[in-house]
Image (cartoon, grey):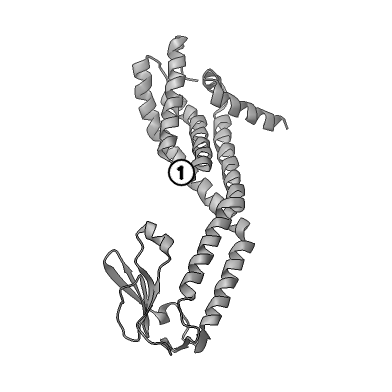
Amino acid sequence: MQSLQTYWHALFESISNPDYYFLVLKKRFRFSILFFSVTLVLIAIAMAIYGGLSTWPTAVSSFHEAGQHLIWQIPEDGEFQYNNGTLTTNLTTPLYLESPKEWKDFEFPRFFAGLSKEEEALDSFLTFSPTSIYLRAQGKVDSLKYTEFVPKDSGSFTRKDLENGFEKAVQSLHDNAWLFMIAFSVIWFVSKVVGGVIMITIFTFVVQSMAWLAGVRLTYKQFFRWGLHIYPIAIGADFLSSLLTRDSHYPLVTIIYLLFAAGILWRARTVQRTIHHV
């Protein structure tokens, strides 16, 4: 309980009190590392909760609608046979599956997929030919043999089978929402730790120049310690901003970081503090 109270006090003071940053330099370096790590963990947990309750269901719903839009363009009597790496169908080809209208905002091709009885790439993002799948992107066409990622076993399926399989996949996404969000949060946390160390290291030199202009003397280690407190606060502010605007503005992290640093240096200059190596 005492450790929790210490953390909340450190968080509040780091946000609201420039003088606190001078007290931080008198504490052990481990204190700043723990503050940096715990704050990012709490933001990651908040992202998992928000994502599990809002973002993920919306994304799965959009995926469901897009999948249905594509599958329903296949004729109901459509049948497909796969035998020893070769795909055949009773449908008239070429058959095109038009992309959902919502994808136009992402400059997606008009046709998401096409089915051909010839070994050729159609004017679509994906083309399913008798033996290969073709991918058209940025004016280039790549191909991949079915045998490279699908067993050579024989089998057949219909449009109804595709619908059932897709619905099971969507239900699995709903059932495992928290698992996906936790995995995302872990990856996010690791990326922010690595990115944070790099950003703080770079900004240490930037803030050093600001300190020189302000007439404040600090060591690189002291600047780095300040960064361990400022960076997670900037990340948290960006997360709160994304809740309001539905979008992340990563430059906001840089702006908040530099504003915090400038405010602390201005305070140091105002009270004519000289900070020696701790």
Q: Residue furthest top?
A: 272
Secondary-structure class at tag 1: loop
x, y percent for residue 136: 32, 70
Image-quadrant location for residue 57: bottom right
Residue at position x 46%, y 79% in the image? 74
x, y percent for residue 276: 46, 16
Tell me if residue 198 can be seen. yes
Look at the picture and state if 57 lies above or below 75: above
x, y percent for residue 34: 58, 35
Q: Nearer the viewer, residue 263 or 197?
A: 263
Residue at position x 58%, y 51% in the image? 54
Look at the picture and state if 36 lies above or below 50: above
User: Dot 1: few (<14), some (14–19), or many (≥20) neighbours within 10 Å?
Assistant: some
Residue at position x 46%, y 15% in the image? 267
Tell me if residue 275 can be seen. no
Which residue carries the number 1 mark?
248
- Give the amino acid type for the residue marked by disc 1 in the picture: Ser
Image-quadrant location for residue 99: bottom left
Q: Residue furthest right?
A: 1
Look at the picture and state if 89 lies above or below 249: below
Residue at position x 55%, y 81% in the image? 161
User: In the picture, which quadrant includes the N terminus?
Assistant: top right
Q: Nearer the viewer, residue 236 or 22?
A: 236
Count of marks overlaid on the render: 1
x, y percent for residue 69: 48, 70
In the displayed structure image, the side of residue 210 where residue 270 appears, left or right: right
In the displayed structure image, the side of residue 100 where residue 175 appears, left or right: right
